[in-house]
Amino acid sequence: MKKIIGPLAAVPCLFLLVLGAFAQEAREEAWKGYMETASQALKDNKPNEAVMAFQAAIGEAERFGPQAPRLASTLFILGKYYFSQGKFLGASTLIRRSLSIREISLGADHPEVANTIDTLAGMYIHEGRDNEAEPLLRRSLAIRETAYGQQHPDVDASLNRLAALYNTQGRYDEVEPLLQRSLAAREKALGADHPLVAAALNNLGVLYHKQNRLAEAEALMKRAWDLREKHFGQQHLEVDNSISSLASLYRDQGKHAEAEKLLMLSMSIRDNSLGAKNPMDPMLAAGLRDLAVVRMAQGKYAESQPLLERSLVIEENFVGRENPLLAATLINLARVHLNQQHYSEAEQLLMRTLTIQEKSSGPEHVSITPTLGSLAEVYDRQGLYGSAEPLWKRSQAILERSGPEEQPNLAATLDALGRHYSAQQNYREAEPFFQRSFEVAEKSLGENHPFVAEILAHHAGLLRQTGRAAEAESFDARAQAVRAGPDEK
């Protein structure tokens, strides 16, 4: 008798295939269920339940295989959530595992791999691990250039991420070619009048400001402002961005009246755009603080005080009363009181600031130096030189150990020490501080910076007090030439 084979023999195999399909569908539904549970838990502000659901989703995703796309995406999502909660080690571990899976399943040069690399680099930057972030950002840029060519928006985004890293490190000469590439690509792809071109122009202008290329910076910022105003109208936050950048440039050039006009315009835009919706918006606080600073520079202390008080209320509402982010406003408010001879109020504000900063960053962190200097000045103004001197010296010691970006602040502290000793008629002790302050300021800020003129004028005063009138006149003339600018020398 012949054995019956053929269709009936295939039934067990077909049955197994059907079972496998049902099992896969069940795993799919289970994974989706856990992800939906995690999403709902986050919406309901139940972080522990969300994490448990994510972890269960990872377990289900692993059943699809060690290189399954679902596994990579679930690891990625949980990694980003951990990062948002400050769990940096767990976050980077998950993102690295997600990256490894995507490199194998998609290929090392896939654009999705570049996206994962950027996320990991962002985490490293947040943790201060710039040296590990840089090669990642370079790699993601190279992947996108290969995948898309030079003109793609994702390539432009990579250029700007790498430029932002170099900018925070003070590597301005390396930032410039990246921003120039970004500008050229946007002009070619979008046209010379596009808002994204305006953003690139403003970014390059801000860089030139930092490089002390002031005329170039001003021209780019004005062009960006004009483009944005034509596209968005006068009362738009994009326009405010250009106005604020230009105001900062004028402030640093000592053009305080021009800066004040721009910042008043900026505040009108922010009040109209933000204030009606949320009078406690942090951007309002920043604008109030900037406007107060330029008014302080013009001696308008009474007008500055309510601006800073309003700014402080907004900031405290946003970050609490013990946050080191309050320091800038507290210091400026203290200086307003100092210049109105409200010494007790100034001292209280500065002591509060110092307590917050030391608790947050430690007693030797560079962030406390402006507070130390302002408190020292409170004591100097009252003739309490013994209380002021250790504060100045402590600030100097911290700044001497800091990086090149702190050189302008070191120059200011050295100049203040020169004035501190001059006020006590201790001219022999004072003069070396003026001399070194000038050297540091000229090197770090450029020979035409307004602060260089201030140092020269302070030194001239010392020379006059010590009977060296001819030298004093020479220093005054040099200071005047700096104030006049290079074209007038």
Image (cartoon, grey):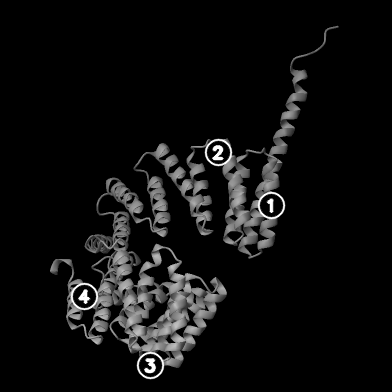
In contact (CB < 8 Å): disc 1 and disc 2: no
Left or right, 7 with reference to 397: right
Question: Which circle's residue, 1 or 2, is located before the other in the chain?
Answer: 1
CA distance for labels 3 and 2: 65 Å
Judged from the image, the secondary structure of the residue bearing numbered disc 1 is: helix
In contact (CB < 8 Å): disc 3 and disc 2: no
Question: Which circle's residue, 3 or 4, is located before the other in the chain?
Answer: 3
| Residue farthest toward the left in the current orientation of the protein | 488
Q: Position of residue 478 (x, y in %)?
A: 19, 73
Question: Which circle's residue, 2 or 4, is located before the other in the chain?
Answer: 2
Instruction: Residue 84: name its quadrant.
Output: bottom right
Judged from the image, the secondary structure of the residue bearing numbered disc 4 is: helix
Which dot marks residue 55? 1
**Quadrant the C terminus occupies:** bottom left
Left or right, 114 with reference to 489: right
Q: Amino acid at mark 2?
A: Glu
Left or right, 291 with reference to 51: left
Q: Position of residue 223 (x, y in %)?
A: 23, 60
CA distance for labels 4 and 1: 66 Å
Which dot marks residue 103? 2
Q: Is residue 276 visible?
A: no
Give the residue number, with chain letter if any, for mark 4.
479
Left or right, 454 with reference to 410: left
Q: Is residue 26 visible?
A: yes
Q: In the image shown, does 93 or 229 lie closer to the viewer?
A: 93
Question: Which circle's residue, 4 or 1, is located before the other in the chain?
Answer: 1
Q: Amino acid at mark 4?
A: Ala
Q: Position of residue 121 (x, y in %)?
A: 50, 51
| Residue farthest toward the right in the current orientation of the protein | 1
Q: Nearer the viewer, mark 4 or mark 1?
A: 4
